[in-house]
Amino acid sequence: MKTRYGILALLLAGAAAGQKQSKPLVLAEQGSFFVGGENKTLPAPPPPASPRPGGPPAFPGGDITINQMYVEYQIPVNGSRHVPVVMVHGCCLSSKTWETTPDGRLGWNEYFVRKDRPVYLADQVSRARSGFDPSTFNAVKAGTIPPSELPNVLDASHQAAWAIFRFGPTYGKAFPDEQFPVDAADELYKQMIPDLNAVLPMPSPTWTNMAALAVKLKGAILIGHSESGFFPEQAAMIDPAGVKGIVSIEMPCVTTLKPAELSTLAKIPILVMFGDHLGDIEGPFNFWPGAFDSCNTFVKQVSDAGGDAQMMSLPKMGIKGNSHMLMQDKNNLQLADLILAWIDKHVEKKATR
């Protein structure tokens, strides 16, 4: 005899399976490519003090490509009716962020495609399938620069992620109304990978490559999250030509903008979205109230400059319990619909005028 909890589990599993097994996903095209990148000439490395028998030979000096950004895409059959959407992940993650959720539900990538939106997923430069400059690491190993010059490699712990992503007030204890599927937290932890952004020059090649991708697509909506939350704005300030709309999700906002920068951003519709429990985290990671305040200031600055900027605070809309990982929360498709409705009203209508 099944317990009520066993029956509930089966119902939830069936709902998740039903979500995944909807109508067949029909595509006009899918593929991948790289954006950006630059050549760097490396000197020949010194011979090793004691070559390892059978080890790989050292490559001679020569040209390598660095800071290129990997992009994969899916274009639905009716995709030409809509402005393409570019999704860029946050710290210690990859574009897996936007795919199937940790508990096996439909992710934003597939959902947006099913809503006839061409979707482009980018791995930040220095992450996952994108490139970076390895020469500092090799120079330290060769002894030509001191170990103190090694850049920091950021890798968030499970405990830090629990707090920063606002799953609960303390590690292992979830908020009663928590929307993130905490039973699947271990699957999220598997998505977390080393973050090599400290090796990158400024301005970040990811910003430049996002701007170039928007131009390549002849117009795109840039979506950033967390570490990359303000990247769409940074990309637009480098080259606004292809940036048709911006969605910035949960990050600190830059408020020390020059008049020319504000003027540029005021020409682009901007949506900023935040979840719940911003001030309810204990310990050193309770920085979300300040991030929220900075973005309210930013939205006002753009609006005062004549722009179309909106703050979408989910709890103020009556949507409670959302974590930092909005695209993976249990109500992720409801939130996707809010973004799609904003895009249709503020970007698509503007693009067709």
Image: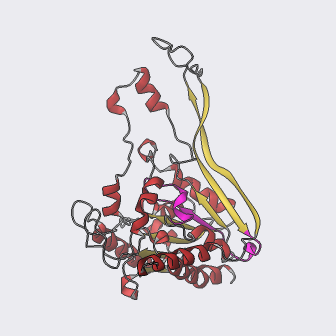
Residue 327: image x %, image y %? 49, 70
Q: From the viewer's perspective, is residue 83 above or below residue 125? A: below
Q: Nearer the viewer, residue 264 or 318?
A: 318
Q: Nearer the viewer, residue 275 or 60?
A: 275
**Farthest residue, direction top:** 50
In magenta segment, residue 84: yes
Residue 314: image x %, image y %? 40, 81
Query: Which residue is at 52% across, 41% downward?
Result: 132
Q: Nearer the viewer, residue 288 or 191?
A: 191
Query: Which residue is at 60% across, 79% downward?
Result: 347
In magenta segment, residue 114: no
Q: Which residues are magenta?
A: 76-101
**Farthest residue, direction front:** 1
Does residue 270 show up? no
From the viewer's perspective, is 254 left or right of 19?
Answer: left
Q: How is the image coloured?
A: secondary structure
**Farthest residue, direction bottom:** 318
Does residue 344 show up? yes
Q: Nearer the viewer, residue 329 or 149?
A: 329
